[in-house]
């Protein structure tokens, strides 16, 4: 499916999280500040619109457009995760150390479902003063669906993958973003072409820990786990094992790898599930710094 994009502004950087509104006709509209750190009385906002229209072949296609306007000052806060003071201080110091090397470069988090990309991504965006976007969420809201599973059911996986690629392509033209990608985004080479415009980081989590996390919250929102027999943990572990075998080499294309097992060893933690998202975010910055200094 060919996906076309309309664009009314050459995007620069965005500040903080998006302000999202659902609009009629299965479209998504949100705004955010962009362009470094402007004075509060001179903030500039961009308006970003995701919606669907009809292509030449009659198929629905994702359309992305944006516009810019000056509006009264507003504070758009991204989500935050409680953490201990020491970790917060270390995280902030590391973000200050790495900022000159990043130079506004986008960060793409890749990894299996349940690896914590969204949680860690929000922490990174806050400490780096970046904007945060979750690819799955953007597609869900544009289509008017509540979950990726619903999109798979109604439109099929190929429809989802086409639109996932289009979202990654559009985001790759911007700066100062942390992007959480879907677990299967790595299987399409074209997605790597776009992600390599920035820095990609693989969150490598042991399968046992992933299966436990997913079993705790349920598998209803995970379309690739549907149809597996057994209890929630067994079902998740079996399918995750197969997916990792299929995608392992693709994940290894990332510029940096963050191993939760390695973090646990360094911190003397017996269970990776007890690692805080902030500790993981710190390691992400460490590995990005190592990559940039090569």
Image: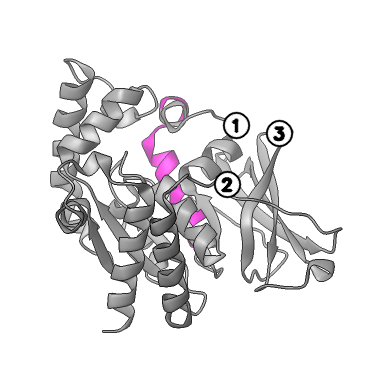
The mark lying in front, picked from 1 and 2, is 1
Asked if residue 234 lies in the magenta stretch, the reply is no
Q: Is residue 145 above or below residue 291?
A: above
Q: Which residue is mark 1?
A: 144
Tell me, yes or no, if residue 56 can be seen here: no
Number of residues whose C-alpha sits closer than 10 Å to that of mark 2, classed few (under 14), some (14–19) or many (20 or more): many
The residue stretch that appears in magenta: 153-169
Which x, y percent locates residue 151?
Answer: 46, 31
Q: Which residue is mark 3?
A: 25
* Residue contact at pointers 3 and 2, CB within 8 angstroms: no
Q: Is residue 85 above or below residue 235?
A: below
Number of residues whose C-alpha sits closer than 10 Å to that of mark 1, classed few (under 14), some (14–19) or many (20 or more): many
Identified at 33% across, 71% down, the residue is 288
Q: CA distance from mark 1 to mark 3?
A: 9 Å
Identified at 47% across, 42% down, the residue is 136
Q: Which residue is mark 2?
A: 62
Q: CA distance from mark 3 to mark 2?
A: 12 Å
Number of residues whose C-alpha sits closer than 10 Å to that of mark 3, classed few (under 14), some (14–19) or many (20 or more): few
- Circle 3 — which element? loop
- Circle 2 — which element? strand
Q: Is residue 293 above or below residue 167?
A: below
Identified at 40% across, 51% down, the residue is 120
Which x, y percent locates residue 164?
Answer: 45, 48
């Amino acid at each position: 499916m060919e996906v076309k994009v309309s664009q009314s502004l050459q995007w620069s950087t965005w500040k903080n999280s998006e302000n999202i509104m659902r609009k009629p006709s299965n479209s998504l509209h949100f705004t955010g500040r962009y362009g470094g750190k402007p004075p509060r009385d001179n903030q500039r906002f961009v308006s970003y619109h995701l919606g669907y229209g009809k292509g030449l072949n009659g198929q629905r296609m994702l359309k992305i457009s944006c516009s810019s306007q000056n509006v009264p000052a507003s504070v758009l806060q991204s989500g935050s995760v409680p953490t201990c003071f020491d970790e917060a201080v270390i995280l902030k110091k590391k973000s200050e150390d790495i900022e000159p090397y990043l130079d506004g470069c986008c960060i793409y988090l890749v990894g299996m479902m349940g690896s914590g990309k969204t949680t860690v991504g929000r922490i990174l965006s806050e400490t780096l003063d970046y904007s945060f976007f979750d690819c799955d969420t953007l597609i869900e809201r544009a289509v008017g669906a509540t979950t990726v599973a619903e999109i798979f059911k109604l439109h099929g996986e190929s429809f989802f993958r086409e639109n996932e690629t289009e979202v990654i392509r559009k985001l790759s033209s911007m700066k100062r973003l942390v992007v959480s990608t879907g677990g299967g985004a790595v299987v399409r080479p074209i997605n790597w072409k776009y992600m390599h415009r920035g820095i990609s980081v693989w969150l490598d989590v042991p399968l046992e820990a992933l299966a436990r996390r997913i079993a705790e919250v349920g598998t209803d929102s995970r379309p690739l786990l549907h149809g597996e027999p057994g209890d929630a943990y067994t079902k998740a572990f079996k399918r995750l094992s197969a997916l990792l075998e299929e995608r392992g080499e693709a994940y290894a294309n990332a510029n940096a790898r963050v191993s939760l097992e390695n973090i646990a060893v360094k911190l003397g933690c017996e269970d990776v599930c007890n690692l805080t998202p902030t500790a993981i975010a710190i390691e992400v910055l460490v590995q990005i710094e190592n990559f940039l200094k090569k």
